[in-house]
Amino acid sequence: MSRPPFSLVGIDHVVFTVDDMAKALAFYHNVLGCVPGYSYPALGMEQVWCGAALIVLWDITDPGAADAVPPIAGGRNVDHICLALSPFAPDDMRAHMAAHGITIENEAVHGGARGLAQSFYIRDPFGNKLELKGPAEYPDGRG
């Protein structure tokens, strides 16, 4: 079996369809602290920086987003995305989410690309599930 002619680096971007761009930008800017990225007004698309990756918000109510409208109402093609965070103080995270009226659906320690770490699961205003994951915590103290 041959190996691919490339190396995987990490998540570059994730695209979420939304139906209220102002509400989407408020959540990603104010709750998660993302900063503005590229803007494509002719497509009804805004991008926000999430560390070195982008989250693309595509407003399906915009005429330029005809290609983004799902073929089946209520369908989904992504379960969740995981956003790596640092630092991660659970009490501060709980207070921050509560201040923004965000429900933490689950708290757990899960594995991932960077190792085992504390995670909080929340949803954006459009029902997209986000895993907010802190820095890796290894049993031998590596970090």
Image (spheres, grey):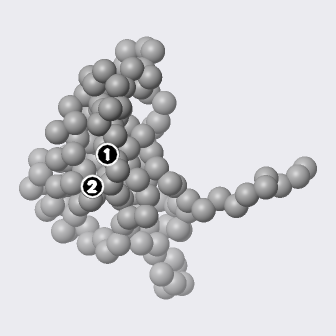
Is the residue marked by circle 1 packed among few (<14), some (14-19), or many (20+) residues within 10 Å?
some
Rendered position, 71 above or below 50: above
Residue 14 percent location from the top left of the image: 45, 45
Residue at 53% x, 68% y is 115
Left or right of 78: which side holds 106? left
Residue at 43% x, 58% y is 53
Rendered position, 97 above or below 26: below
Residue matched to label 2: 36
Left or right of 73: which side holds 28? left
Q: CA distance from mark 1 to mark 2?
A: 8 Å
The front one of 64 and 111 is 64
Q: Quadrant of residue 119?
A: bottom left
Rendered position, 12 above or below 78: below
Left or right of 37: which side holds 82? right
Q: Amino acid at mark 2?
A: Pro
Q: Quadrant of residue 17?
A: top left
Residue at 20% x, 31% y is 20
Is the residue marked by circle 2 packed among few (<14), some (14-19), or many (20+) residues within 10 Å?
some
Where disc 1 sits, the SS reads strand
Q: Residue furthest bottom?
A: 141
Q: Nearer the viewer, mark 1 or mark 2?
A: 1
The front one of 72 and 123 is 72
**Residue 123 — which label?**
none
Dot 1 and dot 2 residues touching (CB under 8 Å): yes
Residue 121 percent location from the top left of the image: 33, 50
Residue matched to label 1: 39
